[in-house]
């Protein structure tokens, strides 16, 4: 068992996890806190620092302090929230079902607003709706504590197969998954279904620098990195994050993420796609291997309670790991270059100005509340105090010669 030591000499328990290479290299998992917009040095050594294990994998079950995840014979998952004594999905193990939908629409799905219904207008496409699902699951335990446990779930449909590696970490309410899809279907669509176990649902989609609440009537809508379905009086809900897909729909409390389609490239109606020569070969959308990451967070209250925008930033931009040999070096072993003290204000851009040689820092308020904040530059011993309005995008221009900051518009003027 490896032991990880930080720059202060503190030791952290660690866990070996499967490496991407099988040439003898091993990856190491441990839990720590990193300085904001900074770095830390850790040393890896031999030893044994046994943590109290509160996460495990057994058979078709993953479990930690907060959740018990059960995987069905067809690969769907059930999540029992132990902290709040409730099933997250209607019917138990029905979550993340790989639903196959008949999709005879053209490349752009002209005039299609709901893939489970016939279209209207000049584009005379009809659909049979849901026609199948991935199933016949094969389960393999690939990690089993003490810090994280994981089960690989392999399922099939038609000529396609899919692997989803579900992971639970000790002490965390975040459920993560790595998805690898090998897609070889024609005129079909794959959606992941999450039938959230709530009444009177409200669906919230992330938009660029904001959010929007939409109807729960099954229409296909765009979104960004997360979608949330929360029940009446904001009592309980589920937020789902992903790093690759941006099409969603919610029918009642059943949240769908659109994963793949298989229409021919650049085929434009209104002629029905059925007129294509069945004996010809066509290059089709989304064929072959593709990957994405998912994260599920069941929660009380609403998405603001867990600060979904901030979690999305953490999820999309994980820390960068640089391995090096042991040497003294010239830099501090740990440092932070920029931080902000308001959890609802993020920094989506730090860059050079379009003209001159000054710095540009862009801030965004994400939870809809006016906020006072301090922008700190620890390495320079400098602090700038400001106030930001709900959902405001604020641009600051930093004179690197004198360390002064002034507020400018989006054109940096």
Image (cartoon, grey):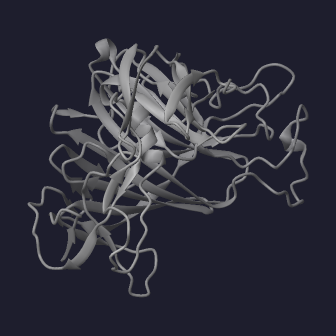
Q: Nearer the viewer, residue 301 or 203?
A: 301
Q: Is residue 390 above or below residue 42?
A: above
Q: Nearer the viewer, residue 106 or 275?
A: 106
Along the horizontal axis of the image, is 170 left or right of 316?
A: left
Q: Quadrant of residue 159?
A: bottom right
Identify the image quadrant of the C terminus: top right
Q: Residue at x 79, y 29 (%)?
A: 110
Q: Quadrant of residue 240?
A: top left
Question: Residue 326, percent across and down?
Answer: 33, 80
Question: Residue 296, percent across and down?
Answer: 37, 41
User: Is residue 407 visible in this depiction of the protein?
Assistant: yes
Q: Residue at x 32, y 14 (%)?
A: 232
Q: Nearer the viewer, residue 236 or 131?
A: 236
Q: Is residue 162 above or below residue 121?
A: below
Question: Residue 65, percent across and down?
Answer: 14, 47
Along the horizontal axis of the image, is 239 left or right of 257?
A: left
Residue closest to the far front: 402
Q: Residue at x 33, y 27 (%)?
A: 237
């Amino acid at each position: 068992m490896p032991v990880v030591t930080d720059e202060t000499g503190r030791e952290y328990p660690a866990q070996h996890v499967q490496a991407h290479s099988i040439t003898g290299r091993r990856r190491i998992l441990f839990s720590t806190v990193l300085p904001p917009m900074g770095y830390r040095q850790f040393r890896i050594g031999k030893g044994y620092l046994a943590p109290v294990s509160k996460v495990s994998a057994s058979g078709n079950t993953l479990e930690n302090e907060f959740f018990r995840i059960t995987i069905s014979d067809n690969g769907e998952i059930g999540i029992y929230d132990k902290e709040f004594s409730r099933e997250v999905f209607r019917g138990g193990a029905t979550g993340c079902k790989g639903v196959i939908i008949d999709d005879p629409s053209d490349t752009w799905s002209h005039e299609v607003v709901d893939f489970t219904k016939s279209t209207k207008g000049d584009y005379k496409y009809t659909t049979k709706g849901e026609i199948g699902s991935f199933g016949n699951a094969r389960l393999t335990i690939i990690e089993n504590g003490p810090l994280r446990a994981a089960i690989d779930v392999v399922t099939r449909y038609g000529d396609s197969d899919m692997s989803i590696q579900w992971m639970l970490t000790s002490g965390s309410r975040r459920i993560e998954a790595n998805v690898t899809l090998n897609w070889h279907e024609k005129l079909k669509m794959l959606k992941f279904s999450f039938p959230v176990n709530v009444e009177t649902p409200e669906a919230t989609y992330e938009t660029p620098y904001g959010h929007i609440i939409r109807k729960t009537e099954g229409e296909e809508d765009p979104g960004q990195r997360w979608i949330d379905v929360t029940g009446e009086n904001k009592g309980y809900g589920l937020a789902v994050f992903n790093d690759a897909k941006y099409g969603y729909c919610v029918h009642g409390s059943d949240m769908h993420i659109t994963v793949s389609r298989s229409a021919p490239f650049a085929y434009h109606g209104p002629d029905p796609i059925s007129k294509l020569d069945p004996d010809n070969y066509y290059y089709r959308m989304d064929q072959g291997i593709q990957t994405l990451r998912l994260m599920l967070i069941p929660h009380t209250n609403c998405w603001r309670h867990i600060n979904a925008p901030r979690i999305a930033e953490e999820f999309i931009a994980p820390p960068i790991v640089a391995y090096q040999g042991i040497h003294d070096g010239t830099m501090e072993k740990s440092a932070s270059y920029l931080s902000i003290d308001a959890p609802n204000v993020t920094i989506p851009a730090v860059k050079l100005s379009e003209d001159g040689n000054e710095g540009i820092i862009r801030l965004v308020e994400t939870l809809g509340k006016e906020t006072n904040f301090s922008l700190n530059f620890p390495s320079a011993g400098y602090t700038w105090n400001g106030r930001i309005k709900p959902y405001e995008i604020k641009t600051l221009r930093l004179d690197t010669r004198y360390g002064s900051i002034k507020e400018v518009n989006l054109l940096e003027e």
